[in-house]
Image: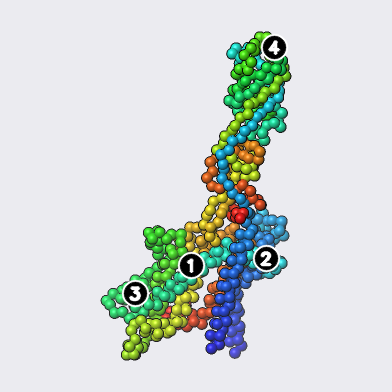
């Protein structure tokens, strides 16, 4: 009995440690966003300055003073960002302008495509689906080269379409939804046919409500993927102010560290909201599609 | 039931957040526009500077002056040198040479060469003296030295590009103007100020002749300091 308790306590300690490791970046970002610009500059400066001379340093090289508690908590950086830096807000909206069309587009395209895969009967259907799966498994960097060539050919480089179009037609959504539709009873369709329903109405009235959790899961997964995307934006977007927030944060890291943490908090919020909104649906949707998260 | 209630609450917050972001973006953009330096623009114009120089100093004519040639050395007070250019006269300028000792006779001359020494005060000018008075005979009197007045003709200097002096900035020994170009910025069209180096050809009455062709509009006046790369807005 005692041994069991010790084992349980040990597991709890391990889990707490693991959870702390997960939560630390969020806490770190939140707490650092409440520091003044000068404090952040002093804490993370690479050289010794009048403001950080008391920190550990070696041969003039300053060691970053990582901490969770600000010397003086202030919301000045939030005020600066929200009221005086419309350029930073623009990067936020850039991310929105890329992510929202991709999420909506994928839901609109993937559901009928998956339905067609499931319902249509033709010789090479499974072969084509296999190709879909193969493309899905390919590393992003491999797919990006043909995507770049296509974007150049369509003259949409340096526009969001270069990211949105491949995103909308990503095979992942089709794959995910079809996995669920595979376990969908055929009798539903037969019953609907007997009631005079065609494919269109059956799809809209029966299939769509049934795959809602999967669509929610797809939305969240796609949102997170494109909200955090870096590679595509670096390759396809050339104008600096068109970059999404995910890329701009690295620029801030190098050029304006004082704004990095508040911008990161702003960057976290939509994903957090979406996760809270679809947390259960996502788990349910993934479960229905037979995939493991 | 509980979950859908919670979801509705989160959705409301999410929508609220998005509305807040739209509003704050609009406000932030407006504040940013307000904070931009206000400028008035203009293009360089063709203009003519008209001026007469009077030079005072000692003139020593050469010993021999067949064909009434002469050389003159004279002292210029540095204040009379135009500040922007350091130029007093150009080779080719026509001048009167008054030599008091010769019955107040005046000579029409032409500046053959002009040089400012390192001290910036001494100038050397060579003249082909053409007597205004045909009866003048240099042998009648000594014209070697003596007090003299050199008077330049009024001369019109035509320039292709003249801007107000307030448009020209100095950085060390270099001069520049700020030009404005339109670009596509994060929130639509923006007007960006950028430096354009130039040389000053002449200056007069608060106007400067610049030695460079500029096709973009130049900032003539501004209500605050404009730096390279700043976004600007215009006076209504």
Residue B171: image quadrant is top right
CA gap, disc 3 and disc 4: 113 Å
Q: Secondary structure at mark 2?
A: helix
Q: Is tag 2's residue or tag 3's residue first in the polypeptide sequence?
A: 2
Contact between labelled residues 4 and 3, with CB atoms less than 8 Å apart: no
Find residue B220 and report its horizontal and vertical position in percent: 61, 47
CA gap, disc 3 and disc 1: 27 Å
> Residue drawn 40% across and 68% down?
A138
**Farthest left residue?**
A123
> Residue drawn 64% across and 50% down?
B222
Q: Is tag 2's residue or tag 1's residue first in the polypeptide sequence?
A: 2
Looking at the picture, do discs 3 and 4 lie on one chain?
Answer: no
Residue that badge 4 annotates? B142
CA gap, disc 2 and disc 4: 84 Å
- Return the residue nearer the eye: B116 or A266: B116
| Direction from residue B141 to residue B69 in the image, left or right | left
Q: Residues within 10 Å of mark 4 (few under 14, many from 20)?
A: few
Residue that badge 1 annotates? A98
Find residue B190 and report its horizontal and vertical position in percent: 55, 56
Q: In front of the other: label 3 or label 1?
A: 1
> Residue drawn 58% across and 66% down?
B25
Q: In front of the other: label 2 or label 3?
A: 2
Q: Secondary structure at mark 3?
A: helix
Q: Secondary structure at mark 1?
A: helix
CA gap, disc 4 and disc 1: 92 Å
Contact between labelled residues 4 and 2, with CB atoms less than 8 Å apart: no
Find residue B13 and report its horizontal and vertical position in percent: 58, 77
CA gap, disc 2 and disc 3: 53 Å
- Return the residue nearer the eye: B77 or A231: B77
Residue that badge 3 annotates? A129
């Amino acid at each position: 009995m005692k041994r069991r308790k010790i084992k349980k306590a040990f597991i709890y300690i391990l889990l707490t440690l693991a959870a702390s490791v997960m939560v630390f970046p969020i806490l770190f970002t939140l707490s650092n966003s409440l520091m003044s610009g000068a404090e952040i500059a002093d804490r993370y400066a690479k050289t010794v300055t009048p403001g950080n001379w008391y920190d550990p340093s070696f041969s003039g090289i300053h060691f970053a003073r990582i901490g969770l508690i600000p010397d003086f908590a202030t919301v000045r950086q939030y005020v600066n960002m929200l009221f005086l830096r419309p350029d930073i807000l623009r990067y936020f909206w850039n991310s929105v302008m890329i992510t929202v069309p991709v999420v909506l587009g994928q839901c609109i395209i993937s559901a009928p495509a998956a339905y067609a895969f499931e319902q249509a009967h033709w010789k090479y259907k499974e072969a084509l689906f296999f190709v879909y799966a193969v493309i899905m498994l390919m590393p992003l960097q491999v797919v990006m080269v043909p995507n770049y060539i296509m974007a150049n050919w369509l003259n949409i480089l340096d526009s969001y379409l270069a990211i949105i179009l491949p995103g909308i037609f990503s095979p992942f959504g089709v794959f995910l939804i079809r996995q669920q539709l595979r376990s969908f009873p055929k009798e539903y369709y037969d019953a609907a046919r007997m009631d005079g329903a065609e494919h269109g109405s059956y799809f809209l009235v029966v299939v769509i409500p049934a795959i809602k959790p999967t669509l929610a899961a797809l939305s969240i997964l796609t949102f997170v993927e494109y909200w955090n995307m870096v590679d595509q934006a670096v390759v396809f977007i050339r104008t600096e102010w068109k970059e999404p927030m995910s890329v701009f944060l690295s620029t801030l890291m190098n050029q304006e560290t004082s704004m990095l943490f508040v911008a990161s908090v702003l960057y976290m919020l939509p994903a957090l909201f979406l996760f809270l909104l679809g947390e259960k649906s996502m788990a349910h949707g993934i479960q229905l599609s037979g995939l493991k998260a | 039931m509980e979950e859908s209630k919670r979801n509705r609450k989160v959705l409301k917050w999410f929508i609220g957040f998005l509305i807040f972001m739209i509003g704050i973006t609009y406000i932030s953009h407006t504040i940013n526009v307000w904070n931009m330096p206000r400028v008035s623009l203009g293009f360089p114009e063709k203009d003519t500077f008209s001026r007469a120089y009077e030079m005072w100093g000692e003139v020593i004519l050469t010993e021999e002056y067949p064909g009434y040639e002469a050389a003159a050395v004279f002292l210029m007070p540095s204040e009379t040198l135009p500040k922007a250019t350091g130029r007093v006269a150009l080779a080719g300028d026509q001048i009167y040479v008054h030599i008091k000792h010769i019955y107040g006779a005046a000579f029409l001359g032409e500046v053959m060469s002009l040089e400012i020494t390192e001290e910036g005060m001494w100038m050397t000018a060579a003249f082909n003296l053409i007597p205004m008075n045909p009866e003048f005979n240099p042998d009648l009197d000594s014209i070697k030295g003596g007090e003299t007045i050199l008077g330049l003709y009024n001369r019109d200097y035509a320039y292709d590009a003249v801007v107000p002096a307030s448009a020209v900035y100095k950085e060390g020994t270099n001069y520049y103007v700020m030009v404005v170009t339109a670009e596509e910025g994060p929130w639509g069209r923006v007007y960006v100020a950028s430096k354009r180096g130039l040389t000053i050809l002449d200056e007069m009455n608060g106007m400067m002749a610049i030695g460079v062709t500029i096709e973009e509009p130049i900032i003539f006046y501004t209500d605050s300091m404009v730096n390279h790369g700043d976004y600007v807005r215009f006076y209504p």
